Amino acid sequence: MRILVLNSGSSSLKYKLFDTKRGVALLSGHVDAIGLPRCNVTFTAGANKQTTTCAVKDHLAAVKLALQSLLDFTVIARLADIDAVGHRVVHGGEYYTGPTRVTKRVLATIKRLAEFAPLHNPPEIAGIKACMRALPSVPQVIVCDTAFHQTIPDHAFLYGIPYGLYKKYRIRKYGFHGTSHKYVAREAARMLGKEKSHEIITCHLGNGSSICAVKDGRSVDTSMGFSPLDGLIMGTRSGELDPEVVLYLIKKKHMDPDELSGYLNKQSGLKGISNLSSDVRDLKEAAAKGNAHARLALDMLAYRIAQYVGSYMTIMHGLDAIVFTAGIGENEPDIRRKVCGYLAFAGLTLDPAKNRRNERVITRPGSRIKALVIPTNEELEIAKETEGLLRERRQGRKKR
């Protein structure tokens, strides 16, 4: 099948057209700064890459541009060659546990859930609607970041607040990066030869980071909670925080909710600790020159990762492998070395040379716990899940 995957941001559109039979992207594109004079458009098809600047008014115009690029690069002969469109949706709440065909009711639900993801769900809805207008006869499917974590049990997803608040406002842990965690966990299980029975911890480490405990292919806990602010210290996000700190800041700094949200989401984390940068590469360079705050920020990141890994080992009664993925996880040997150092007591033996080379397996032969570096591919996972849903529906119709 040929599946178009869309990731719509507030002012951007990323997309890839996949040939799912071969598991390859035929073309990828990125429309940045939609609605602004400086809008940049980048197309990549094999070795052919083009970047241009043009006026793109809204998401409908961006989708039309994306579809035209598929024709211009001749990766398809006509738009009818697209079998389906898979859309990344950040927040699906408790409603969607897998890929879901878009209907008016589904759109209304995603819109209602926008209060939980105000920066993500609205532009994703705009992208879906634009595709529905541009490709009215093509199936539209959503794959939610929260879906993979719907297997987390209630004793893990509930908070220690009155139960009525969950019933009325659905306040609970939802978790995010689910598509990435699902993809790399499955790849890890395949590499280990343990597709059916395994305990794997996946570390999606980027500007936004989360950790997931995966037992036998199912998410049983994850570090992000009600929002993507929870869990690990991140580029500009505080991560887990004593609630009393929030109340104290309100009193001392006289912040309103929007100001405080901006403070914790955009001025905290590695940037806040280092007072320098949210980028690990900048912090490594500064730490090498003796910047104590940059070194502290990096040490805090590794410590928090190891802290979550240790707790998840406990709830799963063991660990076969730890997986590092996303920008930091795939490219920062020093962070991996520090994290793995905390796990030496449990039988993880790092191979320093393999780690420096970013090899897929970075532990020595005989290491009781494997450490793996697996590049994430959320778009391919969305394409595969979209394809799987369509095949199930077709098979169901044949049986009837």
Image (spheres, rainbow, N blue to C red):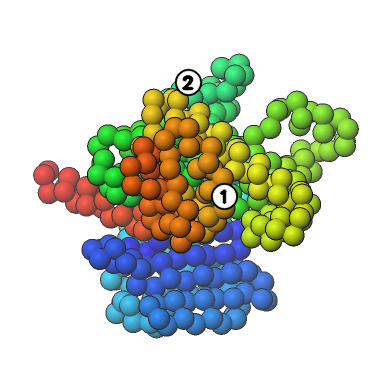
Between circles 1 and 2, the one closer to the viewer is 1
- Amino acid type, label 1: Ile
Label 1 crowd (10 A; few <14 / some 14-19 / many >=20): many
Against 235, residue 24 (above or below) is below
Residue 242 lies, in percent from the top left, at 70, 28
Q: Which residue sits at x=39%, y=77%? A: 45
The label on residue 186 is none
Q: Which residue is mark 2?
A: 155
Residue 365 lies, in percent from the top left, at 33, 47
Residue 249 lies, in percent from the top left, at 82, 33
Report whether 158 appears left or right of 380.
Answer: right
Disc 1, SS: helix
- Amino acid type, label 2: His
Report whether 377 appears left or right of 293.
Answer: left
Q: Nearer the viewer, residue 322 or 234?
A: 322
Report whether 368 appears left or right of 325.
Answer: left
Against 160, residue 357 (above or below) is below
Q: Quadrant of the C terminus?
A: top left
Label 2 crowd (10 A; few <14 / some 14-19 / many >=20): few
Disc 2, SS: helix
Q: Quadrant of the N terminus?
A: bottom left
Q: Which residue sits at x=52%, y=76%? A: 42
* Residue 352 visible (yes or no): yes
Q: Which residue sits at x=76%, y=48%? A: 293
Q: Which residue sits at x=71%, y=45%? A: 296
Q: Which residue is mark 1?
A: 335
